[in-house]
Amino acid sequence: MIILLNLDAGPSERAAVRAALQRQGLAIEESRLGERTAFWVEGSEVPAESLARLPGVERVVPVGSRSPLADATRVSGGRPVSVGSATFGGGQVGVIAGPCTVEDAGVLRDVARFVARAGAAALRGGVFKSRTSPHNYQGGGSSALRDLHAAAREVGLPCFTELTDPRQVAEVADWADGLQIGARQMQNFPLLIEAARTGKPVLLKRHMSADVEEWLLAVEYMLKAGNEKIILCERGLRSAERHVRYLLDIGVVPWLKQRVGLPVIVDPSHSAGDWSLVVPLARAAVAAGADGLIVEVHHRPETTRCDAQQALPFNDFARLMQDVRALAALDGRVVTGSPAREPPPLQAAAGA
Ligand code: PEP
Ligand code: MN
């Protein structure tokens, strides 16, 4: 059982709850859950209903569920997660956009300027890549990380990048605004804990073969480490199908939003594996209630070393942003990002 206190519970309420638990002879352990205090209580004879009535107690969460901390996030009605100027959830839809990998600093700046003007909320770019084959490009590392930071700052956006190893956490946390845990790292538990401990927002992708419970248990590791700034990202599942790279689980978006108070976003790029399918999948995600998207965008995919086939061209991204605004407005939501910016001029088609 977890006794979760209100955000504004002060030291005297904490002490009173602790004393009440001790009077019941219960074994307790006090810890932090984000900015709140939580008492972990052992035993089967816990008088949950009376404890829920103590001043300062927000909720008594049964640990019968395998992910009690994720359950507890629902208490506050799904608080949004902010990353710099970008907000995900709470009626705001954020679009993270940029190249798969940071390669050339000049090209990255072009992409950053375009996606920012089109209304993206944040810039993405991989520098420590998690590649299936050791023979494939592994990313530009520290210098690419600095290029990502510089390009994002130049256009006034926060940036996200993936980390693959706990040893990268300190450096990435210095330069990135949001930490991305990739699908292949979803059960890298030391990485989850170290990333969470930075206190920075963490975007946690679902492993391509993970069921929702395994995904939520990965969330549980980060909540237990004291970080509630978690954005969940569905990016497609391994399936028998070959027409798409991974099968996108759109249904998990409303399912999670009914049960967990964390923002849920969708990656249509890695699920599609083909840029011509990215826009329809992205639209479906926003229509299903996703709090945002993470989309790979590149104007010269023929020059890239990773995921060229799924990179969305500039014009398609600008049109997608218009669609996202229209779809979000259907249920009274707004797109977080840069409404004041002029929409970018569409690029002339090659040879035109
Ligand atoms: C990525 O975002 O570049 C990436 C590698 O995604 P995933 O972890 O979903 O495969
Ligand atoms: Mn990629």
Image: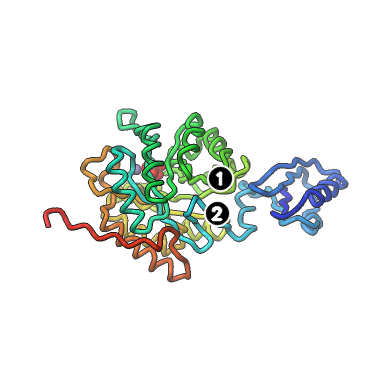
Q: Around disc 1, counting alpha carbons within 10 Å, would you say few (fewer than 14), some (14 to 19), or many (20 or more)?
A: many
Residue 227: image location, x then y, percent: 59, 44
Q: Tell me which amino acid carries mark 2.
A: Leu
How did the renderer colour the structure?
A: rainbow
- Which quarter of the picture shows residue 48? bottom right
Question: What is the total number of numbered labels drawn onto the structure image?
Answer: 2
Given residues 249 and 203, the one toward you in this image is: 203
Specify whether 324 is left or right of 224: left
Residue 247 in sight from this viewpoint: no
Residue at image mark 2 = 262
Measure how far apart labels 2 and 1 are at the Cα level. 10 Å
Given contact means CB atoms under 8 Å apart, are the residues at marks 2 and 1 in contact?
yes
Task: Name the disc covering residue 219, or none.
Answer: 1
Task: Give the x, y percent position of residue 50.
Answer: 81, 57
Left or right: 257 in relation to 156: right
Q: Which label's residue is closer to the chain start, 2 or 1?
A: 1
Residue 146 in percent (x, y) is at: 40, 36
Kind of residue at disc 1: Val
Among the 4 quarters of the image, the one containing residue 325 = bottom left
